[in-house]
Amino acid sequence: MLLSLKIWLACAACISAREIVFPPLSGVESFQERLRDDDGIDISTGSDFHGLMTFANLPYANCFKDSRDGDTLESDIFLLGAPFDTSVTARPGARFGPTGIRQGSRRMGATMGWSIYTGENSFGSWAKILDCGDAPLTFLDNTIALKQLEKAHRVVSGRKAKTPSKSSIPRIITLGGDHTTTLPALRSAASRWGKVSVIHFDSHIDTWDPKVLGGGITDYISVNHGTFLHLAHEEGLVRNTSIHAGIRAPLLRPKGDLRNDVRCGFDMIKARDIDRIGVDGIIKQIKDRVGETSVYISVDIDVLDPAFAPATGTAEVGGWTTRELLSILDGLEGLNVVGADVVEVAPIYDNPGETTVLAAAEVVHSLLTLMVQKPVKST
Ligand SMILES: [Mn+2]
């Protein structure tokens, strides 16, 4: 008995005497002030999980501050959240998409940002990249919310570029939001860059005539996540060199929807075309279509099969894998990408492994990389 007590006391002493040795911490550029002490324990940098959450641990900036208050915020690429989901035709929830995509990006950043495929680090290149947080959008009136989003885009894209020798107008990647949020983004992009070719990754065509989808009963319901590309065409924002990729959802009319789609300026790559022409064939078809024009890339996460992106409002089976989509996106290097978004991420339907938000974050990373690879001067 006495012996076991002695052993217990010895062990207790050994546990309390043990020092926990941390590995050296450094590398992550932090926007937090560093503590100026010298005890060797760093609580300012070194974790992907510290501070408030931004996309890929990028610095946050209040992008809506007034320049008359002495604000001189400059950046080359801005991330902008659009928490809006009241124009959907099926499951809501994408208002939490921006938060979900940021959650999916927590392990991203400059420190471990070197791509095994390209050898590049998009977070540590020439471009300054900031996260604006989310645009403050009312959730009670779609008309006002979309006007707010349009103004947010106008203000952010009107800021000075940090590296004007490379690219004179800051570019925006929007974190949606249901797909209606692409309409204000296209209005803003077209006002800065002129008409754009839209590369539209989606399982649905989204060019539906409001009279067909929703019945056009009021102007209010005519603006929704299945009609915004029709409206963008009517407003003269979209070039007739646009293209869908990954389409597989059924149509409302046997021929009329497709005729209208062509009229809106779109060519179409269907989901199953990948089995026939492969990833390289799809890349070629997209590049041939848009050429040297200014390009806006919109990625509805439902372009992925629900096995890879279950957390979305209008899931359609038979879609692409995450790897296929990322290979196609990375293959678009060299295009003049002036704006982009990832939309329809509704995290409430995701699983504990966060399958959808991880995929969405990596898609944003690919879009960011395309922008860094190809600076675009304004025309
Ligand atoms: Mn869509």
Image: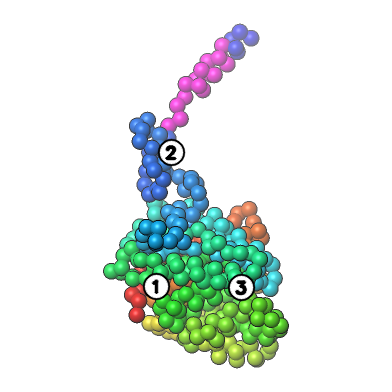
Q: Which stretch did the figure color magenta? A: 6-21
**Crowdedness near tag 1: few (<14), some (14–19) or many (≥20) residues, C-alpha within 10 Å:** some
Q: Which of label 1 and label 2 is nearer to you? A: 2
Q: Amino acid at mark 3?
A: Thr
For the point 46% across and 61% down, the residue is 64
Give whichever of discs 1 and 3 has the lower sequence position.
3
The x and y percentages for residue 146 are 57, 71
Q: Nearer the viewer, residue 320 or 182?
A: 182
CA distance separating discs 1 and 3: 36 Å
Residue underneath mark 2: 43
Q: Are marks 1 and 3 in contact (CB under 8 Å)?
A: no
**Crowdedness near tag 3: few (<14), some (14–19) or many (≥20) residues, C-alpha within 10 Å:** few
Residue underneath mark 3: 143
CA distance separating discs 3 and 2: 45 Å
Q: Amino acid at mark 1?
A: Glu
Residue 340 is at least partly visible in this image: yes
Q: Left or right: where does residue 320 sit relative to residue 286?
A: right
The secondary element bearing badge 1 is classed as loop
Residue underneath mark 1: 333
The x and y percentages for residue 90 are 70, 71
The x and y percentages for residue 37 are 36, 33
Q: Quadrant of residue 167?
A: bottom left
Q: Main secondary structure of the magenta part?
A: helix
Q: State the scheme by which the image is colored.
A: rainbow
Q: Which of label 1 and label 3 is nearer to you? A: 3
Is 25 drawn above or below residue 342 in the view shown? above
